[in-house]
Amino acid sequence: MLSKKRPIATLSPEERLLSVTYGSRSFSREIPRFEIPGEGVPAEVAYRLITDELNLDGNPALNLATFVTTWMEPEAERLIDCTLNKNLVDQEEYPQTGVIQERVVNMLARLFHAPKGGEGIGTATVGSSEAIMLALLAHKTRWKKERLARGLPADRPNIVASSGVHVVWEKFARYFEVELRLLPMAGERFTLDPEAVERAVDERTICVGAILGSTYTGHLDPVEEIDRLLSRIREKKGWEIPIHVDGASGGFVLPFLEPDLRWDFRLPHVRSINVSGHKYGLVYPGIGWLLFREEKDLPEELVFRVNYLGGEEATYTLNFSRGSSMMLAQYYMLLRLGFEGYRRIHATSKANASFLADRLADDPRFKVIGPADHLPIVTFEIATGAGFSASDLSDKIRERGWILPAYPLPPDLAARSILRVVVKENFSRDMADILLGDIDLAARALSGKRIPGRRGSRKPGVC
Ligand SMILES: Cc1ncc(COP(=O)(O)O)c(C=O)c1O
């Protein structure tokens, strides 16, 4: 018999063998929430307590809201598992990890058509947010240096971008004291309007931000047009204004599906690009990339050289220590899939997104926003008179486990609420059929229409 008074951690191995995880006292007591417990619990108990609680979270496979990868193959997970204890910053101790990071930077530099002949200039980051902060900081520093060198005032820098930018652009503006000139979206225009860009830029513009594609709707800003505009401005006014491309989602899709689309370093004003490895780079959360066109785009004074670990290391990151697993998983994915593998996976996601968009467009209760043809992202509104709102549908469909977010468009179009499906690798045509059936059922329940037996009513693919 096990003593009731003795904590489980003090039991002998024989006694523990007899103990049943769910029979242990930890499961009938309040769990520590505010203070570190005086004594610990066996590993299996700690594991169970936490994983049971996490069952209340949504199911990542049904999370249509996230851009972030929710499935990787077992070999990738094994690699992640066996590299969890390596700090990416310890390049003196883990030199091959550093070499692999350089290889990925070089692969991406070539994918984005950086000028030939040199090493790729860039770094792994935690995600696109860190990459965007670092890129904008580099533009601010370069602009300030150039202004001071010419004896001009270097205060009140600004950035011009669309109101559809991700919140990290606003964070950068506030944290680093730069004015963010957000150009409104209007009507059915969900991207930057080059004419408005022309009116907004001036000699204090440190860069124009172009998004591929927008977090709200997946649309692509017209980078090539903006590039041409900035060339004209340089000729007329002498202002050298770079473009930073926020390719958080599109940067890992467009090179594979539309290699002739010119948005990257082929355009002379594009001086930096960020991309999230953990979105369409097909790696779990925790990896982004920042690429500069050339060495001169990254001011030397921003690169820190430290020697804490037995050798000099050059870093351009906001954080010091971080895991290396996701960076290594990115290299795994590039090796494993190659160009053709990425192309096929993204082409499948796009085909499933088009299928979903076409079915929704055929249904008078919905209005598909678009076309956002380039990325596997589907956004739609509820038609007037449907008898329910976007958030009603989002809540209702959650009953089946789907996570389908409803959110307002940016401030200038905030009266419109939309729903977004980010189609990812693990969202098959079969899943699209089931989702459409569930949307139909939810919409009918919300508008008070009679719902016949669930099975009979679920016509695959019809909404
Ligand atoms: C356009 C855009 N930029 C930046 C980000 C932030 O990326 P991350 O989550 O990789 O930091 C996102 C995230 O969805 C995004 O869509």
Image (cartoon, rainbow, N blue to C red):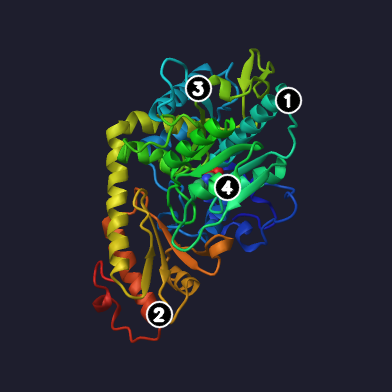
Nearest to viewer (mark 2 / mark 1): 1
| Separation of marks 4 and 3 at Cα, in angstroms | 46 Å
- Residue 75 in the figure: left or right of residue 5: left
Q: What label does residue 97 carry, if any?
A: 3
Q: Depth-wise, is mark 2 or mark 4 nearer the camera?
A: 4
Q: Determine the image quadrant of residue 309.
A: top right
Q: Could you tell me residue 299's position as x and y percent?
A: 63, 23
Compare marks 2 and 3 and give the one earlier in the sequence: 3
The three-letter amino acid code for the residue at tag 3 is Thr
Q: Would residue 319 appear left or right of 187 to someone viewing this image?
A: right
The type of residue carrying mark 2 is Ala
Q: How far apart are the alpha carbons under marks 2 and 3?
A: 55 Å
> As displayed, is residue 66 above or below residue 270?
below
Disc 1 residue type (three-letter): Leu
Q: Quadrant of residue 340?
A: top left
Disc 2 secondary structure class: loop
Mark linked to residue 409: none
